[in-house]
Amino acid sequence: MSMARLSAKDSNSEPKRARIEAPLVLGFSADDKIRTIQPRDDALVVTLRIGGYDVRKVLVDQGSAVEIMYPDLYKGLNLKPEDLTAYDSPLVSFKRKTVTLRGQIRLPIQTGLDVVEVDFIVVDAYSPYMAIVARPWLHALETVSSTLHQKVKYPSNSQVKEIVGNQSMARQCMVATILHRPNTESSASVERNS
C-alpha cells in the first residue's frame, strides 16, 4: 500500500526542471534614445571613477588602441614623474603630429562594483578632455557603446549596467577644441587672410 501511495504521489508531482539562464543581450533600442537630443552626432563623453576620483570629461573612443591621460588629470591626481613608467612608442595626434609623452601609469577604473585596471599614457598636449578610454578598457569590461544612444552598456552580476553620456559636456568640449588655437596657427591664418 505504501508503494501505491508513493507511485501516485510521484506521478502527480511536477518534474524538476533545470534552471536555464538566458544570456545577457547587450544592445540598444529606440528607448535608449529617450532623454538624448536627436538628431545629433555628439561624441560619447562620460564621468568615470579613475584612481579613486570621479573624473568628468572622459571621451569613450572605440577607434583608439590606448587610454590617454591629459595634463589636467595628471595634476589633479597629484601624480609625479616617479609614478610613471617609460613608454617609448611614438604617439601621433589627430593632427598627425608626434605627441610628447611623459610616461605610462596603471590605474583602476571603477564602474559600479566592477573595477578594471588599465594603462594610461600620459601626454603633454592640450585637450578639452581629462582622459580618453579606448578598446583595452572597453574590451576588459566587455562593453558595447553607442554615440547615437549616448550610452555604454556592460554585463555585471547577471545584469546589464549602463553608463550614460553627457551631451552638454560633449558640446562644451567640442567648442573648447574649436576655440583653442595655438598662437602659431592663428598668426599663420591671419597672414594668409591678409
Image (tube, rainbow, N blue to C red):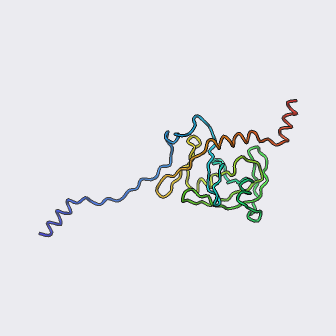
Kindly give the residue lying farthest to the bottom in the view shown: 2
Taking depth in this image into account, of 18 and 58 the one nearest to the observer is 58
Q: Residue furthest left?
A: 1
Spot occupied by residue 46 in the image (x, y as percentages of width and height): 61, 48
Which quarter of the image is occupied by the C terminus? top right
In the displayed structure, 177 sits above or below 191; it is below
Q: Quadrant of residue 87?
A: bottom right
Residue nearer the viewer, 61 or 131:
131
Residue 119: x percent and y percent? 67, 59
Q: In the figure, is residue 92 to the left or right of 17?
A: right
Q: Residue at x 25, y 58 (%)?
A: 14
Q: Is residue 193 left or right of residue 2?
A: right
Spot occupied by residue 59 in the image (x, y as percentages of width and height): 65, 48
Q: Quadrant of the N terminus?
A: bottom left
For image coordinates 77% across by 42% down, the residue present is 180
Question: Relative to residue 35, is residue 190 drawn left or right?
Answer: right
- Against 134, residue 177 (above or below) is above
Residue drawn 70% across the image and 59% down it: 77
Find residue 190 and report its horizontal and vertical position in percent: 85, 34
The number of numbered discs placed on residues in the rendered structure image is 0
